[in-house]
Amino acid sequence: MTQNKTNETPSLLLEMRGISKRFGAVQALTDVRFDVSSDEVVALVGDNGAGKSTLIKLISGIYRPDAGTVRWQGREVSVGSPNDAAALGIATVYQDLALCDNLDVVANLFLGHELATRGGPLAVMDEFAMEHRAVEVLRRLSVKIPSVRIPIASLSGGQRQSVAVARSVLGDNKVVLLDEPTAALGVAQTHEVLELIKRLRDEGLGVVLISHNLADVFAVADRITVLRLGRWVGTYDAKATGREQLVALMTGAVPGTAEAHAGSPAAAAPPAEDVTP
Amino acid sequence: MSSTLEHDPRVIAERAGLRGLGAEYGRRIRQGDIGQLPVVVGLVVIGTIFQLASHGVFLNPFNLVNLTLQMAAGGTISVGIVLVLLLGEIDLSAGVVSGLCAAIMAIANVQVGLPAPVAIGLGLVAGMAVGALQGVWITRFGIPSFVVTLAGLIAWQGALLRVLGKTGTVNLRDPFITALAGTFFTGPAAYACAAVFLAYVAIGPLVTHRRRRAAGLTVPPLAFVAVRAIAISAFVIGVVVVLDADRGISSGLLFLVGCVIVMDFVLRRLRFGRMIYAIGGNAEAARRAGIPVQRVRALVFLLASLFAGWGGILGASRLLAVNQSAGQGDVLLNAIAAAVIGGTSLFGGRGSVWAALLGIMVIQSISNGMDLLSLSSSIKFMITGGVLLSTVTIDAVLRRNRAATSR
């Protein structure tokens, strides 16, 4: 089994504090905080331009923060490149999927990390081992595809998304970033992907979900971090937060935890950071 | 462990037996994964037409041996072209580079007096150097391969003229060089060659089928694999019997088939091959997966020029001379046409190196057959162009269908 199914208490994996990022004249992020633990789904929400994508790119190593600290399992780290993030165990499933249409499911799952008896580009791939692993992981995640030897081009949008997500499970990752995984999907396919996200959590992974669709967010998220105009508004327990309340926080109609005043509506939702150390 | 997944009935209703296979094949064709069947059908049609039109000359042993000799050089160049096409790139310099490498070999051997193996080595090294330069140029500066290799086509043409100097034509007499493409294997040696070939293309898949079943993986019906193996074996043994009735199997053909088998293994079984397909399919996905995209690209251009050089040397060995028009005319066009006719997509990521072998068989059969019928060059060129255009059209139409049917 790839994932150590942690039945222990969830542990804090990624902890970001005081994160700022500037692009020329644009202050994309200011003093943002963000946490992910194992066994949880954290949704990252905010209106367009809130800084969701920038934050995700900082986590996945595409950008480097200008200021702030990043801790991984309690240790301060510097994530300067996608390879650094991958080495820590952070996988990103991009919106445009990054799959090769011409290759079959097995080839895509192992792309860049093909199994072989030795390393290097001239190694003979172990197709049997890859196919066994692929079938095992897909079955564990209940991903429904006609065959693991079918080219990606023949799959539906939901199936492609599932394959892209399953790839992150194969690589011994601890945190999976999902960028708008349901954006282009129909109702049934969206349901499939949301179920898959829950199973990732049950596998012990920390899942970061970026979505515009609040129904999706409430369906799977344990905690919700809200950004607005590059600032951290607050992090809320999904079960204790209402939909209207979340919209109000996203749009700035009500102040969040960060600028909370006693008696404001947002105070009803306690900051979730206090729950997980 | 069994490998059955939960099936999604909406996607593909998998049916057992040959009808299921037919449905599966139909689906693959609609998605543009046409495989080798069309070109095999094409070969049968071409063979039949010319056999009838030439009153039985086309398929007689003497002519078929000639056909294999004509295939060697162009087919080898086409192997390199298939590699660049799989990346979604193009190499327009391959024809001229084949001439340049042959010229360097000829001058080194005949005028400088170097031993033949050294001269051949020099020619191949020159090919690799040319390929490396083009590959690095394309990847380093991000210039389309079309432009860089077009510049190469012109520049290496100049280099070829420069290397040949005032001589114009160099005749090759060295027995080692002339034996390169012109050695024949008959009788037991010929059948041994056929056995090795069949072990790879016919027995290999049967063994894989068994091992997959033993490992508990899904397998196509055994009948399907067996019928394919029997058909290929019958065809190959038939060809060897006919060739053996004349001069036998030429070394040129063996070199070509050898290159195809080696590159087929590289493409299907090695990580490097997987990288090439991945880049051709989605270069950005390949990059994100940690594949060194630019290095692989540069290396493939190096290989393409190496195969071009080797093809040029085989061609020179057959013609016993290198002259100023070496590698010009239809050499490049035939190599590209062969790759495309054989089923390699111009848009990258789809095809196999067998396309080079099957495609050059089609191209040279047409050329050889029209020679037998004494058709004029004007008609030959027009027909060859028509065949190429229709093949590319099929590729483009299938590609559009693929976009439409992908769900």
Image (cartoon, rainbow, N blue to C red):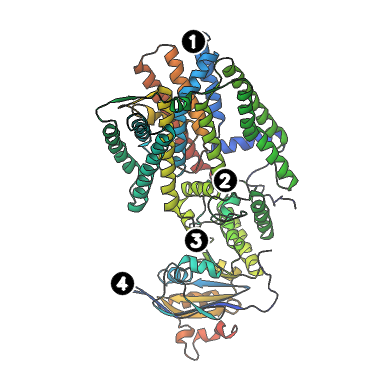
Mark 2 neighbour class, 10 Å CA radius: few under 14, some 14 to 19, many 20 or more? many
Looking at the image, residue A247 sits to the left or right of residue A115; the answer is: left
Mark 2 falls on what kind of element? helix
Position of the N terminus of chain A by quadrant: bottom right
Q: Nearer the viewer, residue A251 or B392?
A: B392
Question: Can the viewer see residue B120 in this picture?
Answer: yes
Frontmost residue, A111 versus B106: B106
Check if mark 3 and mark 1 are on a common chain. no
- Mark 3 to mark 1 CA distance (whole Å): 60 Å
Comparing labels 2 and 1, the label whose residue is closer to the camera: 1
In the rendered structure, the residue with mark 2 lies on which chain? A
Callout in the foreground (4, 2): 4
Chain ID of residue with mark 3: A
Q: Write down the residue under mark 2.
A: A154
Question: Which is more N-terminal, label 4 or label 3?
Answer: 4
Q: Amino acid at mark 2?
A: Ser
Q: Classify 10 Å Cα crowding around label 4: few (below 14), some (14-19), many (20 and above).
A: few
Q: How far is the residue under mark 4 from the one under mark 1?
A: 75 Å
Q: Position of residue B61 (x, y in %)?
A: 55, 14
Q: Which residue was labeled with disc 3?
A: A94
Question: Residue placed at 47% from the left, 28% from the top?
Answer: B180
